[in-house]
Amino acid sequence: MGLVACASLARAQSTAPRWRIGYLGPSAETAPRLLAAFKDGLAAQGLVEGRDLVVEYRWTNAGTRMNDEATLVASAREFVAKKADVIVASIDPAIFAARKGGGTTPIVMLNASDPVGLGFVASLSRPGGNVTGLTNQSSDLVEKKLSVLLEAVPGAKRVAMLVSGPGKLRDDTVGRARAVASSGGIALQVVEATTAAALDDAFAAMKRERAEALLVTDTGGGVFFTERARLSELALVHRFPRIGERAMTLSIRRVGVIGEPAGSLLLSLRDASSSPAA
């Protein structure tokens, strides 16, 4: 019986998940496509939850509202206490919290607005430290968005541009938008809303300036993501033709090839999970 018990224990240990990931991001109720993309990305790497790894999920939101910073940082510290091999943080508030509470645990950031400007990494080509990942924003995109908006609203001469936060991304984005607007004889009204509470005042300001169309550009902070339904509602109420961010469904699929340290770690998790146990 002793030998049988030992053999059973050995088999259980050999088939137990080897790796632990802490996932901090929007819940399935708030952003189903983001979470689905993460799970699909794991599957594409050949990683199966429960077999190869355990994923500890903690959410950035309570319902449709963002949790406060202390709650998010506590989640990151919980991952460290549970000895997570890597922390996956989706959207800016989660990334801030992971960096603050995650210690030296490697961090993969998803859907970061301005990784360099917000201090997440030293540069996009050489992130440095223990953070790497993906960004879904670029100041280059605003030129195309504004052009598409003006094609959709021919004759518009006053366009409001709603931005969500200060920093280099904001400055670059606004600068590019002003150049496009100026070349087309368009008056561009830049309005900033860094919190959910500021949205009503922002739309009131656009209305006072008689904006004829709205360009929404998330330049950091995550407020436009968490308040996207309300943004759409306010745009309808004020009758602003609008172009904004596409749903953020960047997944973990490419994480294995984006570099040190956390990307290579996840790639090694995939490779190790398909190798015979030592």
Image (cartoon, grey):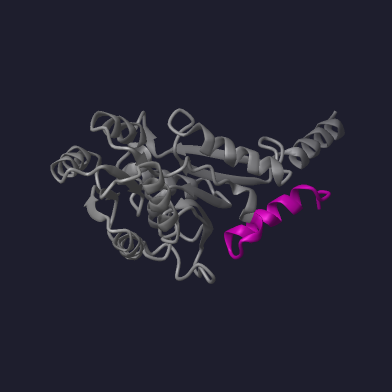
Q: Main secondary structure of the magenta part?
A: helix
In the figure, is residue 197 to the left or right of 32?
Answer: left
In the figure, is residue 106 to the left or right of 41?
Answer: left
Work out whether residue 126 or residue 192 is closer to the camera in this orientation and state it: 192
The residue that appears at 38% across and 43% down in the rendered structure is 243
Q: Is residue 107 above or below residue 195?
A: below
Task: Give how far across and how far down residue 108 sits, in percent.
Answer: 53, 54
Task: Give how far across and how far down residue 193 sits, in percent.
Answer: 24, 47
Q: Is residue 28 magenta?
A: no
Quadrant (top left/top right/bottom left/bottom right) for the N terminus? top right
Task: Give how far across and how far down residue 230 sits, in percent.
Answer: 30, 32
Q: Residue furthest front?
A: 155
The residue that appears at 72% across and 50% down in the rendered structure is 270
Q: Is residue 259 magenta?
A: yes
Identify the magenta region: 256-278
Work out whether residue 184 or residue 74 is closer to the camera in this orientation and state it: 184
The residue that appears at 57% across and 35% down in the rendered structure is 36
Task: Give how far across and how far down residue 125 sits, in percent.
Answer: 54, 70
Q: Is residue 189 above or below residue 168?
A: above
